[in-house]
Image: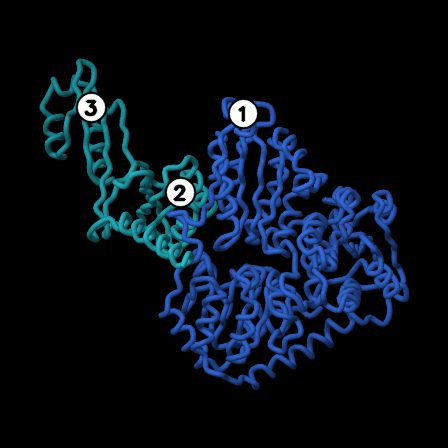
Amino acid sequence: MPVYDCLYDYKEKLQHVLVRHEQGAAHAAQGYARVSGEVGVCVVTSGPGATNAITGIGDAMLDSTPIVVIAGQVVSSLLGSDAFQEIDLVSLTQPITKWSYQIRRAEDIPWAVARAFYVARSGRPGPVVLDFAKNAQIEKVAYEPCTIDYIRSYVPVPEMDPKAIAEAAAIINSAKKPWALVGQGVELGEAQNELVEFLEKADIPAGCTLLGLSALPSAHPLNKGMLGMHGNLGPNLKTNECDVLIAIGMRFDDRVTGNLKTYAKQAKIIHFDIDPAEVDKNVKTTVAVLGDCKETLAAVTELLEKNNHREWRDSFLPCEEKEYEAVVEKEIHPKEGQITMGEVVHAVSEATNHQAVLVTDVGQNQMFAARYFKFSQKRSMVTSGGLGTMGFGLPAAIGAAFGAPNRTVCFFCGDGGLQMTIQELGTIMETGTNVKIILLNNSFLGMVRQWQELFFKERYSNTPMINPDFVKIASAYGIKGRKVQQREELAGAIEEMLATDGSYLLEVEVEQVGMVYPMVPAGDTVTNVMLG
Amino acid sequence: MDKTLYTLNVYSENIAGILNQITTIFTRRQLNIESLNVSASSIKGIHKYTITTCTDEDTIQKVTKQIEKRIDVVQAHYFTDDEIFFREIALYKIPTQELLDSNRVEYIVSRHNARIIEINPTYMVIQKSGTTEETQELYDDLKEIGILQFVRSGRIAITKSCVEKLSEYLTEREQKHIRSKKNCEE
């Protein structure tokens, strides 16, 4: 409360966004950080306010998102006594933060705040928690500004090793079938241009992880699509065919690799990363190139010979054709039946000229959005990758709208996930934030339903949803909306949505039994791709 | 995979909560900490943790990196027994009567190179430092006499390779930072 009392004096200088739930606050801070590259900040109260934020903190940790969460705490003298709304937040959050610190005296504030922002944004970014004891909030001290750009125990960016650079370049130069995996590290390191130069010079096709999708423009000829469980056919098959696999700012998540025992065993592995703990964590590397990929990519590129791997590049074509025929065409251009999720995503992406920021929730909506939304600008993909947090999307989209105020923010969600943080429609109402909400309503927890169909003998245990009238709910919050059930209405509704000033809810009734394909079953070999 | 007993040396800033951060990394991987010793190091403000755990090399490598990644941890290194000198200390409390009745106690104490550090009419306390096997052997010998209490410390260890490089490392980091700051200002 003392902090909020002070904020009252700064109404004109500091824009405070009052969210409806602390989980929403943390996700909104994430959304803001992901599109802007700045540190997202949220302030929550002690006890339940702090525990509510924990999902967002964990999400930010797994997805390397720089946020600072400032939480209230009881007065220092009551710490440890089970006082009202006391929770041991530092202990709770230590495993899911880059740094978690309790401020017990006002003298520590300048140091702790400066350190929090430095830690959150430097090196591999991540969440920081400041647990702010009440007495420290009200004590008066002479303020001495403090800046921190060095901590002796913390090496944010490992020093570039010229030997590793030379070795990596030599391996790439002698490669016949090089294959690059692009992760979010490229976005975090602002190395999008360095990546393109690197790929183009040596003529290396590339696949992107879910979080790395907008690091390389979708239309770039060397971009062969998405990796992983619901990724494109070529990228998954070619992983086990390439002779050199170059991972850039990605961490070989199990959703990307499938069974590690059969993953890229034929290839030499080069791993560009800023975090030494990622090297050899899941996949043994031949050469680890540690450092900031903006610098390391440029350094390796300098040593690369201009190359042409046309035959190898062209070998992706049959995969693309096969996938298009078996999966893509009927998903984005269905001739009959109910509207599909893929067709909605495709239509919205086209209508925004692939310029929009994509925010997704988690589940089928996320995978369809990732597969069929196209990107032409960097930092355009906001999704919960590591933690897979349903309910992430709506608040993250609000944060993204604040972080990229001049861009269209398209938020895709399902009927399940939207209801997990639906209260944040109130935040939109209050702030007038501009978020285009595209609800792909199949009246199911769709991804779970898909697994039940495939792996649990079609026993649909607790996945059908009895849903409210979403357009009415939006309307109650003063948000315009429309429900579409017929294919013929879709294009017009999208146009209406994009032409609307402010937020809009487009609810599309999509087929209930839609399935995301291709699919590599969890833990299976990356080449075991089900096409439906 | 083959499991080995590894000794992990961790150097950290002296800030509350570091131990928790280290132990959660073991917990996540279902690794048991066999022994743990924490104390101030020779460098001011730096604490040293000596941890032993049984695992394979792949796992200990990953654990070490994940510990070193914590912001307030300066360095972490792992060693096998042949790379370090290590000791633990054990205390044994036994009834004094045995000492008076025969020379068995004296014989055992001298054979194990142990020391008696307290004798009173009721009990005596024997101290022994050495490896786990050595303190265990003394325990087994004294067991026949009857042990009232027994306690063993965690392992402490020192590397066989020359000097502790931590202070050099910290000085180097400090100097590099100053240099880069100067470069920025220029």
| Residue A164 left/right relative to B100 | right
Q: Mark 1 points at which residue?
A: A75
| Residue type highlighted by circle 3 | Val
Furthest-top residue in this view: B121
Letter of the blue chain: A
| Residue type highlighted by circle 2 | Asn
Callout 1 crowding tier (Cα within 10 Å): few <14, some 14–19, many ≥20: some
| Vertical position of residue A393 compared to residue A269: above or below | above
Q: Position of residue B167 (x, y in %)?
A: 27, 47
Q: Mark 3 points at which residue?
A: B125
**Frontmost residue, B64 versus A305:** A305
| Residue A308 left/right relative to B135 | right
Chain letter behind tag 3: B
Mark sitting on residue B32? 2
Chain letter behind tag 2: B
Mark 2 or mark 3: which comes first in sequence? Answer: 2
- State the hue of chain B: cyan
